[in-house]
Image (tube, rainbow, N blue to C red):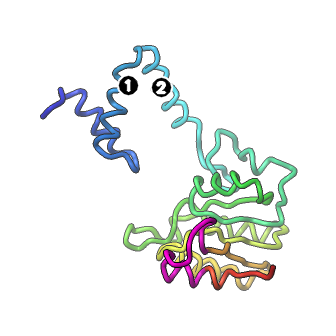
């Protein structure tokens, strides 16, 4: 063992973060040790405050310290369109584009039998209630084209089909600046399916 026990434990904790390997965890641990005690205390307080105050919005299930959240209470949003995403980070990615001006619904995951996640573990019931009780015209499914994502889309489409609402899914295809020759077959077929008139 190269590290004293408290430092090794700190590195182990940082490695539990998604996408953080051993070297990144070491850099983070050494960075924390180089800070003043007040800076480290402030970081700890900020983490605790975020954990205590940030919760799922009771309406759309986005993460916020407000309930309902900032998006749900924004009167300039088009509430007749609901964009369904699997996680809050997907909502944030869509917001960064500044293109979408409607409402959201976060499923808080995807249907994944391998992980023991079924439809009852997601906020699907609440989505169906919103579509049935609010004046919703379109539901946009902005869910990644993975096995779990496709299973979730099929399930949602089955539940939404009887309702008087248009159900669409975002197009998937080639990234801007990408070459056709390097694209995989699934990406190319999705690009063809999502084509539109110019």
Picture coordinates of residue 114, whole percent (x, y)? 37, 72
- 193 left or right, relative to 148: right
- Mark 2: give few (<14), some (14-19) or many (20+) Cα within 10 Å: few
Q: Residue at x 72, y 77 (%)?
A: 168
Label annotation for residue 43: 2
Q: Is residue 4 above or below residue 113?
A: above
Q: Is residue 61 visible?
A: no
Tell me the quadrant of the picture where the C terminus can be found.
Answer: bottom right
Q: Which mark is residue 32?
A: 1
SS assignment at label 1: helix
Q: Earlier in the sequence, mark 2 or mark 1?
A: 1
In the figure, residue 115 lies in which quadrant? bottom left
| Position above or below: 6 against 146 | above
Callouts 2 and 1 close, C-beta under 8 Å = yes
Mark 1 Cα-neighbour bin, 10 Å: few <14, some 14–19, many ≥20: some
User: x, y percentage for residue 133?
Assistant: 79, 68
- In the image, taking residue 13 as reference, residue 108 lies left or right, namely right
Q: Position of residue 48 (x, y in %)?
A: 49, 31
In this view, the residue in front, 31 or 47, is 31
User: Over which residues does the magenta segment extend?
Assistant: 173-190
**Within the image, what quadrant is residue 104 found in?**
bottom right
Q: Residue at x 49, y 32 (%)?
A: 47
Q: Between marks 2 and 1, how big is the CA–CA gap?
A: 9 Å
Splitting the image into 4 quarters, where does residue 32 fall? Answer: top left
Which residue does the image show at 52% across and 28% down from the upper left?
Answer: 46
Q: Is residue 28 visible?
A: yes
- Circle 2 sits in a helix, a strand or a loop, which is it? helix
Is residue 99 inside the magenta stretch? Answer: no
Is 181 magenta? The answer is: yes
Location of the N terminus (image quadrant): top left
């Amino acid at each position: 063992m190269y590290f004293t026990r408290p430092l090794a434990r700190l590195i182990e904790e940082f490695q539990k973060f998604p996408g953080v390997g051993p070297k990144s965890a070491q850099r983070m641990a050494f960075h924390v040790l180089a800070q003043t005690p007040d800076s480290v205390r402030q970081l700890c307080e900020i983490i605790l405050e975020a954990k205590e105050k940030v919760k799922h919005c009771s309406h759309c299930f986005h993460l916020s310290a407000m309930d309902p959240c900032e998006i749900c209470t924004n009167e300039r949003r088009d509430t007749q369109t609901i964009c369904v995403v699997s996680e809050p980070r997907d909502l944030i990615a869509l917001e960064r584009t500044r293109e979408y001006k409607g409402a959201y619904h976060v499923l808080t995951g995807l249907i994944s039998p391998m992980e023991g996640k079924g439809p009852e573990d997601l906020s699907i019931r609440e989505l169906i209630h919103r579509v049935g009780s609010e004046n919703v015209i379109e539901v946009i499914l902005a869910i990644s084209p993975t096995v779990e994502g496709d299973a979730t889309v099929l399930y949602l489409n089955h539940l939404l089909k009887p309702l008087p609402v248009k159900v669409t899914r975002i197009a998937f295809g080639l990234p801007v600046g990408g070459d056709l020759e390097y694209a995989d077959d699934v990406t190319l077929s999705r690009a063809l399916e999502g084509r539109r008139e110019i």
